[in-house]
Amino acid sequence: MGSSRRLILASGSRARREMLAAAGLMFEVVPADVDEGAIRDRMRTDTPAIDAGEVAGGLARAKALEVARRRPEARVIGADQVLVLGDRLFEKPGDLAAARAQLLDLRGQTHELVSAVALAEGNEVVWSTLTRAQMTMRPFSEDFLDGYLARAGDRVTESVGAYHLEGLGLQLFDRIDGDYFTILGLPMLPLLAELRVRGVIAA
């Protein structure tokens, strides 16, 4: 078994695909067919005070398992990211207007990004972990925000925070405490360590 299993990323995320490719991994992309909103809502209904990490972890495991059940010969990476401000969990904005409203809510405040990753084989999640980052936005002007959205365009809707730290989104922040890969949505260092343990990549 071990390293002979094909590696699959159960996500259509461009950022996650680019991170894995940049790290030299050979993998296939098979997006998970799950209703993230329904899973998230069910978890929050069952446990109203659920921690953001449990939500992110539950979604990462659900994505990995859905693809692993279709591809039992593979080792499947599932991932998810949750943005939390106080008691509010944010989802990816549906359009630029929603992104603008979301960024105004986050302006001048510190929010948390929780990124989870899971490995599944067949009907079992064999490993999972999560990491957290604290993000403090500066009190930017609405003129700046409108200019930012005009330049960044629809790509901001690909991110739960409506920003890409590797691009123009960096200008939104005063302070960042956390791992760069956590912010991009995939805890790469613990994932790579686990893949070395399992013989997928050289130790």
Image (cartoon, grey):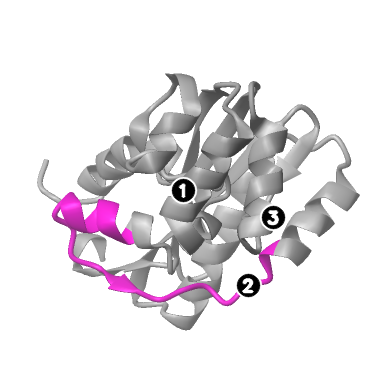
Instruction: Compute the Cα span from label 1 to label 2.
Output: 16 Å
Name the amino acid type tagged 3: Ala
Q: Residue at x 68, y 36 (%)?
A: 104
Mark 1, secondary structure of its residue: strand
How dense is the environment of label 1, judged by Cα within 10 Å: few (below 14), some, or many (20 and up)? many
| Residue at the outermost left position | 202
Badges 3 and 2: C-beta atoms under 8 Å apart? no
Q: Residue at x 65, y 48 (%)?
A: 100
Q: Measuring from the top left, give residue 56's x and y in whole percent.
A: 61, 46
**Which callout, 3 or 2, points to the residue nearer the camera?**
3
**Which callout, 3 or 1, points to the residue nearer the camera?**
3
Q: Does 56 sit above or below residue 158?
A: above
Q: Does 187 sit above or below residue 95?
A: above
Name the amino acid type tagged 1: Val
Looking at the rendering, the stretch of residues picked out in magenta corresponds to: 17-36
* Residue 30 colored in magenta in the image: yes
Q: Which mark is residue 34?
A: 2
Instruction: Compute the Cα span from label 3 to label 2.
Output: 23 Å
Q: Earlier in the sequence, mark 1 or mark 2?
A: 2
Q: Earlier in the sequence, mark 3 or mark 2?
A: 2
Q: Which mark is residue 98?
A: 3
Q: Residue at x 38, y 28 (%)?
A: 179
Instruction: Compute the Cα span from label 3 to label 1.
Output: 27 Å
Towards the viewer: 81 or 107: 107
Mark 2, secondary structure of its residue: loop
Towards the viewer: 203 or 13: 13
* Residue 161 colored in magenta in the image: no
How dense is the environment of label 3, judged by Cα within 10 Å: few (below 14), some, or many (20 and up)? some
**Which residue is identified by label 1?**
117
